[in-house]
Amino acid sequence: MAMKVYISGDTVEIDQTSQPLLNIPRNKAIYRIENDDVTIFNNEDRTVFRTDKLANIQNQSGTTIGNLQDVVKYLSKSVVVRGTSVTRDATTPGGGGEANTASNVGGGSGVFKQKNGIDLEFKSLIAGNNLTITNNTDDLTLDVTGVGEVNTASNLGAGEGVFAQKTAQDLEFKSLVAGSGISLSSTGTDITVTNSAGAPEQFYLERIETINNTTAVDIEYFTFVQGGTEITNTITVSGGTYYFEISFLAFCTSNNGRIVVNPQVNSTDIFSQPYKRERKDNDEIFYESISKRVALSAGVNTIQLQLSNNGSGSARIFEANVQITKV
């Protein structure tokens, strides 16, 4: 057996099992509780009433209200607006209701503060920075404000881009990796890119002769000068391909004089045939330059430059230079 008690417009409706629906004007409805019996009646005509057990009182949806305290609270605040009476014997079970308390669960900040007498006291929610709280009928709505711009990033120009992608709120950039001959170092604000390989591997070899105009000169396997200090005709290299540029200043006194230049590495000719140059004008002084890419093995290599006079005429070489640069 059950008795539903609820408001419908300006009337209190009582829907009790096996009984016809009873309507009492809300301003005339009154209830009385005696021990476990709940009676709701018309205060102007007390022959109009319904009575049921405390445990059978339900709301409109059929949900049981609960113990004495719950029923009194429901009827007084939600249904009946006029005076009431409650009579309970001291020996009646459940007369005092439950001795309730509350607690906070989980690892966050709790909202329950304490129990003061029969009052359970809870902390209030206060909106902090960039937060609003809206107090609705049955719930609270928390909204975040001032969350800033929805940013992304992009790469400009035609070079390799450093921006990779955006994952959620995180802008992800590519890292710099040092390749061959490059080193990287960073501080709190800067990344420094350094050419750790240093200057290009380069050698400059030179020979200058003091020659009179009456004697032909044949200079073979001469000692080079680098930076003003005499060195032998050997260089120490890391190995690979090197660019040889050979230049010389010469003088021919007759049509039959001829300059011959034959560069060698480790006694092997660089060119398939020596370079030869005849004069074009009488008493001509001329400058010549020849070049070629040459493979050198790592370690010590002997550089030889044979400069000679070929023919019956006079030909003189004043200066010869060899510049060797790793490609």
Image (cartoon, helix red, strand yellow):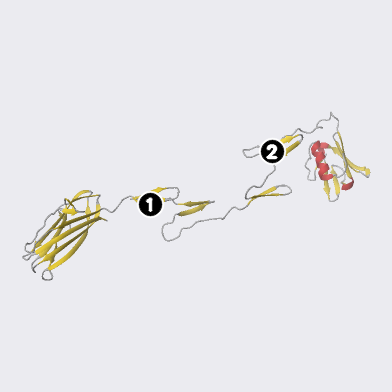
Q: Say if residue 271 shows up in the picture.
A: no
Q: Position of residue 79 (x, y in %)?
A: 83, 45
Q: Does residue 257 show up? A: yes
Element on which disc 1 rests:
strand
Name the residue at 11% across, 63% down: 316
Q: From the viewer's perspective, tell me whether residue 107 is left or right of residue 291.
A: right
Which residue is more in the foreground, 162 or 147? 147
- Amino acid of disc 1: Val
Q: To which residue does mark 2 refer?
A: 112
Depth order, front residue of 265/208: 208
Q: Describe residue 130's horizontal placement relative to residue 326 as left or right.
A: right
Q: Quadrant of residue 320?
A: bottom left
State whether residue 120 is above or below residue 157.
above
Which is nearer the eye, 111 or 6?
Answer: 111
Farthest bottom residue in view? 281
Residue for point 81% across, 45% down: 78
Q: Is the Cβ of the residue at disc 2 closer than 8 Å to that at disc 1?
A: no
Neighbour tally class for label 1: few under 14, some 14-19, many 20 plus, Cα within 10 Å: few
Q: Position of residue 60 (x, y in %)?
A: 80, 45
Q: Position of residue 182 (x, y in %)?
A: 35, 50
Q: Would you say 220 lies left or right of 88 here? A: left
Q: Could you tell me which secondary element the residue under label 2 belongs to?
A: strand
Position of 89 with respect to 124 (left or right) is: right
Q: Answer above or below: position of 27 versus 288.
A: above
User: How many numbered discs, if any?
Assistant: 2
Residue at (18%, 54%) from the top-left corner? Answer: 225
Say what amino acid the circle numbered 2 marks.
Answer: Phe
* Mark 2 crowd level (few <14, some 14–19, many ≥20, 10 Å Cα): some
Q: Which residue is mark 1?
A: 193
Q: Spatial distance from mark 2 to mark 1, Cα to Cα? A: 58 Å
Mark toward the start of the polypeptide (2 vs 1): 2
